[in-house]
Image (spheres, rainbow, N blue to C red):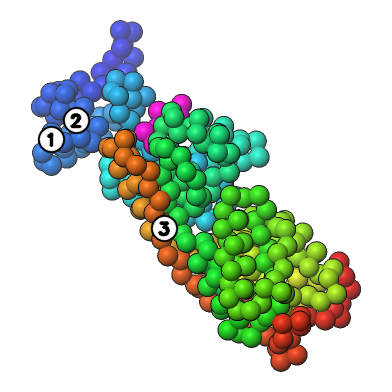
Amino acid sequence: MTDPRGRPSAPTMRDVAGAAGVSTALVSIVFRGVPGASDETRARVLAVAKELGYVPNRTASMMKRSRTRHLGVAMNVRNAFHGEMVEGIQAAAQDAGYEIVLSGITQSHPELRAVETLTEFRCESLILLGCDLSTSELRVVSKRVPVVLIGRRVRLDAVDIVRSADHRGMALLVDHLVGLGHTAIAHVDGGDHPIAAERGRGYRAAMRRHGLAPVARVQAGGGTEQDGQRAAARLLALDVLPTAVSAFNDHCALGIIDALTKAGVRVPEDCSVTGYDNSSFAELATVNLTTVSQEASVLAETAVRTAIARIENPDADPTDTVLQPRLMVRGSSGPARADQVGADQGVRRSISKV
């Protein structure tokens, strides 16, 4: 195979067809992954293509057909839980004959730009993890392409929801801490994150159920380690430190533990700390974080199945699929000391305030 100047040229689909003894149309079917070729023919075409070094021109292929079989995924590159979700989404999409196009959210590449990138790649549906877009922005996006939100509740046409029962998950944590004898339990919230409100409601409802509403304390926080450190500093400035803290997520909990430890507060002996998400680092021996698992693999599989269902039936009513979370008890939570028990008790400050 040479070009008009006698130089080696890249093999084409026609070259693969000739070497495999099939038509170019059949080669196209094989590389598009659609029905129409036997397993034996498919294997022979792929083997010949590998031998010749043929690489399909995916961009050209996309332009020639109305479907791309691409699912777009926008995720925060610093969020460990999002990374786990992407692994599950990739596996589920591949099993269904789809590929994912990943767009990372960073400080220099905000979520709206990440979503626009995915639409430019002509993704057939978007799966957004921990979406922070406003309702009006989501409405505009969903008019261009179907959207599946993981974790966040919103009522919009062409937007399907797959989420964990965050209200229930936070209640599991409060029940666990109360069962350990804690009554002075604070909650560090997720700031203006859309999921934060649901988890905060779960905390307050559980505290009311246990008769602890008068001592419930919600401290402003966020979803990063830095947010947790700042929230912990404000808790440490109190005359009485709560004996337990439930954090918005695992990253926030990690920041709280770091700040408490640096201030000389032992976790969990002096103050128990819990997270949310069961991120990959939560089970490390140095972290050993009590948290809530949202069953990332199940969320991922359900999101992919929901996205494909919407592609196949675009006029169906929006769906809201709620999965049940699971409590993961580890070493960051422990029994309240005898001198800490009581609704008005906490850890009396014996160390300098920060």
The answer to whether any part of residue 254 appears in the image is no
Q: Position of residue 31 (x, y in %)?
A: 24, 32
* Mark 3 residue type: Val
Which residue is drawn at the image coordinates 71% and 78% (left, top)?
184
Question: Three-letter amino acid code at disc 1?
Answer: Ala
- Residue where numbered disc 1 is placed: 37
Residue at 33% across, 8% down: 5
- Estimate the spatial distance between the alpha carbons at disc 1 and disc 2, rounded to whole Å: 7 Å
Residue 322: which disc? 3
Task: Determine the secondary structure under disc 1.
Answer: loop
Residue type, mark 2 in image: Ile
Residue 113 at x, y percent in the picture: 57, 32
Q: Residues within 10 Å of mark 2 (few under 14, many from 20)?
A: some
Examine the rendered structure and indicate whether residue 346 appears above or below residue 56.
below
- The answer to whether the residues at label 2 and label 3 have Cβ atoms under 8 Å apart is no
Q: Does the residue at mark 1 contact the one at mark 2 (Cβ under 8 Å)?
A: yes
